[in-house]
Image (cartoon, rainbow, N blue to C red):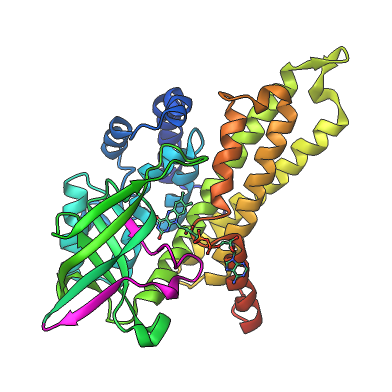
């Protein structure tokens, strides 16, 4: 019933992505981390190979990969630097609402323009006073005649400075809380959009995170994705996909941490033998590997569920918690195995540990994802088969 063998096409894509990561990302990963650089040249090359819009159907200019293939490629592209890897896959989350609920015209217009012009998107949900409590958002899209007037601001928006297409969640009926939020596709050149502060971050340094301000931005029905007041549900469905994506990214982070630790364990000599000959190190490497194979199985299984068009909210929230906690543990253990050299700036293990921390925070903190997952368990919506 279950076949885990990759297809010839999946193998080809993954091999190409691994090669791309090793040749294009690895040589600059530490440099871009130390002094953040927008990876423009890498993005251009990734576009030529079809890696920028993996989830977008070919009819709208993407590579049309199914979810399983997209997540396999995501793991490969995030192995050498998850900040650059995520810049390559940045439009995945922000285009999900359009793919899920956009009309044919909207898909052609917004996705077509993006893929033709080698442009990118961003997902604008978080606000200064609405982080975990996204429903407390103050950004308003007030209906005036046949227009919506957008006012408010968003913070911590990944790719907020550079995105050409903004997927913005705004309240259309503040009385109704989550049931009064709508989703809008907003082209960057719409008058009234300003970029604020660019954040200086602990990890994911080559990923640019910005504040955004909206001042009397005029939108129409053409910008409204899905029905009015149904944006929150769309955001959650997009986040299901995003959380599986994070599971694949965490798999890459953990795999790299294990590879660095195993290499060091085979080389470093103490007490007259390599440290890899000590059982205490075997236990640590084995614990790391256990987490990795579980994470990989999770994203493959959830990718399969999404390909079957099944909701996987409970499972995606659970997988995101598991994989990000695993990434934090495996990267901390990699630093431990590398000892003092792992703690020094310029060590890959040190970067991985800083990068891993974000995965426990964005797309819902792990506390919030545990609430989502726990509620799903209580409602009985946790049956896979
Ligand atoms: C680098 C980075 C990139 C990001 N990119 C994006 C993006 O592209 N788009 C976007 O919209 N957002 C983005 N975010 C925002 C991110 O999703 C939020 O930071 C996250 O949802 C948490 O919100 P907060 O930071 O306001 O923390 P808060 O909500 O203030 O939470 C603070 C702490 O309280 C805990 N907490 C809150 N409520 C509860 C509860 N009910 N039960 C238990 N604990 C609770 C949280 O788990 C956390 O530990 C990004 C954030 C970062 C750091």
Query: Could you say where residue 272 lies in the image, as x and y percent from the top left?
Result: 87, 12
Query: Could you say where residue 15 lies in the image, as x and y percent from the top left?
Result: 45, 35
The answer to whether residue 356 is magenta is no
Residue positioned 46% across, 33% down in the render: 18
Residue positioned 11% across, 84% down in the render: 145
The answer to whether residue 143 is magenta is yes
Compared to 166, does 139 lie above or below?
below
Query: Could you say where residue 87 lies in the image, as x and y percent from the top left?
Result: 37, 43
Query: Could you say where residue 159 lies in the image, as x and y percent from the top left?
Result: 33, 48
Residue positioned 70% across, 41% down in the render: 289
Q: Decide which of 52, 232 is in the foreground and name it.
A: 232
Q: For residue 18, say whether it is visible.
A: yes
Q: Quadrant of the C terminus?
A: bottom right
Please indicate whether residue 35 sits to the left or right of residue 378 in the image: left
Residue positioned 39% across, 27% down in the render: 24
Please indicate whether residue 174 sits to the left or right of residue 62 in the image: right
Compared to 356, does 42 lie above or below?
above
Q: Quadrant of the N terminus?
A: bottom right
Give the residues in magenta. Answer: 122-145
Q: Quadrant of residue 263?
A: top right
Q: Decide which of 186, 68 is in the foreground and name it.
A: 186
Q: Decide which of 229, 273 is in the foreground and name it.
A: 229
Please indicate whether residue 13 sits to the left or right of residue 145 in the image: right
Counting the numbered discs, the total is: 0
Q: For residue 292, say whether it is visible.
A: no
Q: Decide which of 194, 361 is in the foreground and name it.
A: 194
């Amino acid at each position: 019933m279950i076949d885990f063998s990759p297809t010839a096409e999946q193998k080809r894509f993954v091999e190409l992505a691994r090669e791309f990561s090793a040749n294009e990302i690895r040589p600059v990963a530490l440099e871009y981390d130390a002094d953040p650089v927008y990876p423009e040249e890498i993005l251009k090359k990734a576009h030529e190979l079809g890696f920028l819009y993996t989830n977008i159907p070919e009819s709208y200019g993407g590579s049309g990969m199914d979810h399983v293939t997209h997540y396999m490629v995501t793991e490969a592209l995030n192995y050498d630097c998850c900040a650059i890897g995520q810049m390559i896959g940045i439009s995945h989350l922000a285009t999900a609402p359009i793919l899920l609920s956009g009309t044919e015209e909207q898909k052609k217009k917004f996705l077509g323009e993006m893929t033709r012009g080698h442009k990118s998107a961003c997902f604008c949900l978080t606000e200064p006073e609405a982080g975990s409590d996204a429903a407390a958002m103050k950004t308003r899209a007030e209906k005036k005649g046949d227009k919506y007037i957008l006012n408010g601001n968003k913070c911590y928006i990944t790719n907020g400075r550079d995105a050409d297409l903004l997927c913005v969640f705004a309240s259309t009926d503040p009385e109704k809380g989550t049931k009064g939020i709508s989703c809008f596709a907003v082209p960057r050149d719409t008058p009234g959009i300003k970029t604020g502060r660019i954040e200086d971050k602990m990890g994911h340094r080559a990923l640019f995170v910005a504040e955004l301000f909206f001042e009397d931005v005029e939108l129409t029905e053409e910008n409204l994705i899905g029905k009015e007041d149904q944006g929150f549900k769309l955001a959650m469905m997009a986040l299901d996909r995003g959380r599986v994506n994070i599971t694949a990214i965490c798999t890459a982070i953990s795999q790299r941490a294990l590879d660095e630790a195993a290499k060091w364990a085979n080389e470093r000599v103490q007490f007259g033998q390599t440290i890899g000959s000590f059982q205490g190190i075997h236990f640590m490497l084995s614990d790391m590997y256990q987490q990795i194979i579980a994470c990989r199985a999770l994203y493959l299984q959830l990718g399969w569920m999404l390909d079957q068009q099944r909701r996987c909210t409970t499972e995606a929230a659970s997988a995101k918690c598991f994989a990000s906690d695993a990434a934090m543990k495996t990267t901390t253990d990699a630093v431990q195995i590398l000892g003092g050299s792992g703690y020094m700036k310029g060590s890959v293990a040190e970067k991985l540990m800083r990068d891993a921390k974000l995965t426990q925070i964005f797309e819902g903190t792990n506390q919030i994802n545990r609430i989502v997952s726990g509620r799903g368990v209580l409602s009985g919506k946790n049956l896979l088969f």
